[in-house]
Amino acid sequence: MNDLQKQITTKTELIAQLLYNKVVEFASLADHDLEALRALGYPYSAEHPQTIHEPPWLVHIQSGQLRKAIKVEKTKKGWRVGIDEGIAPHAKFVIFGTEKMVSRDFLVEALKAIREDVRKILAE
């Protein structure tokens, strides 16, 4: 592996870890449990959505399965950050919403949040 390949490998690993950390952060709100959300009148319902925090796409920990399902792994082509749907099959409903629930795409928002850091890493 030449120096350029080593730099690329190091930088992509750093970017993957940054993204993983941001995704975990965005899926780890702990200020309301399921009982509190129920008492608030189900603020994520599509019928009567409420903004109970900013930004609105942050996700509260309920069972912890979604947070456990967030993975970063090395692949043959680089790095992958994503959700293991075998652990959290409900993740797609949180991210894309349903007929009854608003979407909270914390994955795309995590990408947006690290954009400047990625630019700096790549410019080094």
Image (spheres, rainbow, N blue to C red):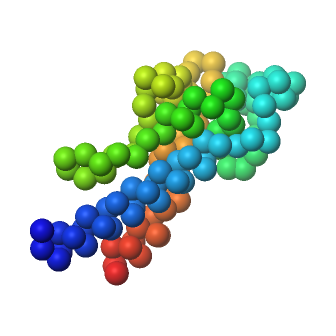
Q: Residue at x 49, y 34 (%)?
A: 69
Q: Residue at x 60, y 47 (%)?
A: 26
Q: Is residue 107 above or below residue 49?
A: below
Q: Is residue 99 above or below residue 55?
A: above
Quarter of the view holding residue 98:
top right
Whole-percent x, y for residue 123 in the image: 34, 79
Q: Residue at x 48, y 39 (%)?
A: 70
Q: For this rendering, which residue is in front, 49 or 11? A: 11
- Is 1 left, or right, of 21 in this rendering? left
**Do we see residue 120 in this rendering?**
yes
**Do we see residue 94 in this rendering?**
no
Residue occupying the far right of the picture: 39
- Is 42 left, or right, of 13 in this rendering? right
- Is 34 left, or right, of 85 in this rendering? right
Q: Residue at x 12, y 68 (%)?
A: 1
- Is 81 left, or right, of 24 in this rendering? left
For the C terminus, give its image quadrant: bottom left
Whole-percent x, y for residue 4 in the image: 18, 75
Q: For this rendering, which residue is in front, 100 or 62? A: 62
Whole-percent x, y for residue 97 in the image: 55, 27
